[in-house]
Amino acid sequence: MNFKVPLFLAFAASLGGCTYVHSYFSKSDLDDANAFCEQSRSDPALRPIAGKLPIASPDEISPEMLALDARPTDTELEAVKVLSRDQRACRQRLRAVMQAHEPAQLATREELNMKLDLVTAELLKRNMSYGNANRLYRQASLEASDKLTEQAKQDMADAQEREAATWRSLGQSLAGVAKPKDAMPRSERSCSWVDSSIDCSAH
């Protein structure tokens, strides 16, 4: 067997693990970032707004939180400022993960962060209730989630197409390597009589 064949096969086999390895490290880094963000839950400075605003994710928003008509008190405003500071640190960690593994998602996440900050700014000015702020947080999060889902689908389709193209290329290369070489063309023979015998030796 031509020595190139095992090399091609080894390379092809490695392709199957690339997506898995990428996903593993991406999930590991994301888990670390989320664990960092979750630390805010134990911050005593946030107790005044516990159950009034989401701490680590808009997914925490409950129907009861959407129904809150109250606006922040002076004590609660200080807690909102601490939460905003913690969330900025959280976003920086998440942004580093996205930059390394999913850079196509950065624009959507930055847009979401800007919307969340605008809502927090209005809350700090006491221009809206907790319930209104939570509704806007949730809406912005859902819109971003829809965009990220569409991006993920497109990214997956692109990755599958690239992988399929690589396999096609490898298949063509393997076919070329394994194809038996054409037999050497025979020299044209010219037969003729030599005395009473036929001579078909090559000329």
Image: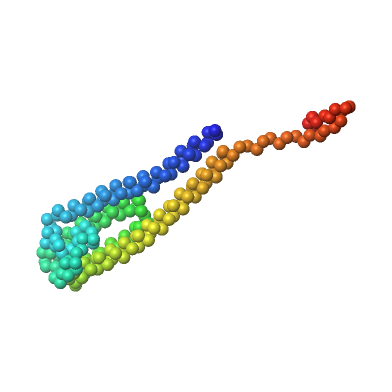
Residue at the front extreme of this rendering: 196
Q: Position of residue 180 (x, y in %)?
A: 61, 37
Q: What is the image's colouring?
A: rainbow
Q: Quadrant of residue 62?
A: bottom left
Q: Name the residue located 43 percent from the left edge and 55 percent from the top edge.
A: 157
Q: Is residue 173 left or right of residue 85?
A: right
Q: Nearer the viewer, residue 203 or 74?
A: 203
Q: Position of residue 109 (x, y in %)?
A: 31, 60
Q: Position of residue 69 (x, y in %)?
A: 15, 72
The image shows residue 71, relative to residue 54, as above or below, that is below
Q: Nearer the viewer, residue 109 or 153?
A: 153
Q: Is residue 155 left or right of residue 193?
A: left
Residue at the right extreme of this rendering: 195
Answer whether residue 78 is visible to the viewer in this image.
Answer: no
Q: Quadrant of residue 47?
A: bottom left
Q: Name the residue located 24 percent from the left edge and 65 percent from the top edge.
A: 137
Q: Nearer the viewer, residue 4 or 182?
A: 182
Q: How many marks?
A: 0
**In the rendered image, which quarter contains the N terminus?**
top right
Answer whether residue 165 is visible to the viewer in this image.
Answer: yes
Q: Position of residue 187 (x, y in %)?
A: 75, 34
The image shows residue 170, relative to residue 183, as above or below, that is below
Q: Is residue 25 left or right of residue 43?
A: right
**In the rendered image, which quarter contains the C terminus?**
top right
Q: Name the residue located 24 percent from the left edge and 55 percent from the top edge.
A: 90
Q: Name the residue located 73 percent from the left edge and 35 percent from the top edge.
A: 186
